[in-house]
Image (spheres, rainbow, N blue to C red):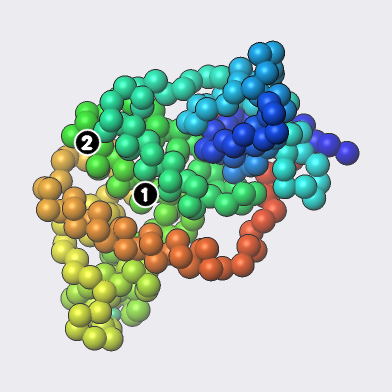
Amino acid sequence: MAERVETQAIVLQRFAFGESSQVVHLLTGALGRVVALARGAWREKNSYEGPLDLLVRGTVTLSLVQGRELALLTGRKVETAYPGLRSDLARHGAACHVLSRVLHFESVGSGSGAFALVDRALQAIETVASSRLPLLLLAFDVRLADLHGLRPDVDQCVRCGSSRQLARFVAGAGGVVCVGCLGQRDEGAAIDVRSAALLRDLATTPLRQLPDPAPATLSRARRLLDLHLEWHADALLAAPRARARPAARRSSRGRR
Ligand SMILES: [Zn+2]
């Protein structure tokens, strides 16, 4: 028995399949990342306003069969192609950053609820001042990490819980480590109070309320978060796929 699900979706990847079809990866509101077959997407008459292109949001109808990873796309109505993303190179680059993070962190069927975060980020990339794009991407990464339970802990030592004499950022440990708990004096990477505060604020404060950080603070926070995400992305990839079955399978509408 096939189950029909209607939800919002953003196209993450698309591959040609056969003469006229596509296989697409969608980030959906209801089911997280889904792989679907869009039959006849290249035909002049199709049900998708197709062929499907990257970073286009629409309402899709999916037919799912229990036990099969490949869904069937039976319809799509385009809502936006986020035209602002395609208007200049910096915005396009920022959108590519978001896309690569999603492809890395959202595995098929593991619905993390990233749809709303990604949709909001893409809309913000369209309109935010270009000078704020690096800050916006840092905020996106912090929140994506948070969704996956990977927010770096910068408030207290991840080894003893003390909030005093915080010394170094140790990606493999998940955050800052105090002087007393450091294995070696040069373990991890240097962290300063401002970069730590920025990483914390980005997770909790709306971006428009955050003033521009000093360039050195922004670049250090960026470097620390990159170290953190690299370490955890590798760990995620190495871990067995224990989270394969989404809880939201039965809901019929995307969250918005
Ligand atoms: Zn400690």
Three-letter amino acid code at disc 1?
Asp
Q: Position of residue 181 (x, y in %)?
A: 28, 84
Tell me: is circle 1 under 8 Å from ligand 1.
Answer: no
Q: Position of residue 64 (x, y in %)?
A: 77, 38
Q: Position of residue 201 (x, y in %)?
A: 27, 50
Tell me: is circle 2 under 8 Å from ligand 1.
Answer: no
- Identify the residue shown where x is 15% and y is 46%: 213
Three-letter amino acid code at disc 2?
Arg
Question: Which quarter of the figure is the C terminus placed in?
Answer: top right
Question: On the rendered structure, is 198 left or right of 45?
Answer: left
From this view, report whether residue 145 is shown above or below residue 99: below
Secondary structure beneath disc 2?
helix
| Residue denoted by label 2 | 132
| Residue denoted by label 1 | 141
Distance between mark 2 and mark 1 Cα atoms: 14 Å
- Choose top left, top right, bottom left or bottom right for residue 172: bottom left
Whether tag 2 and tag 1 are in contact, CB under 8 A, the answer is: no
Q: Position of residue 16 (x, y in %)?
A: 62, 34
Q: Quarter of the picture for ligand 1?
A: bottom left
- Identify the residue shown where x is 19% and y is 83%: 185
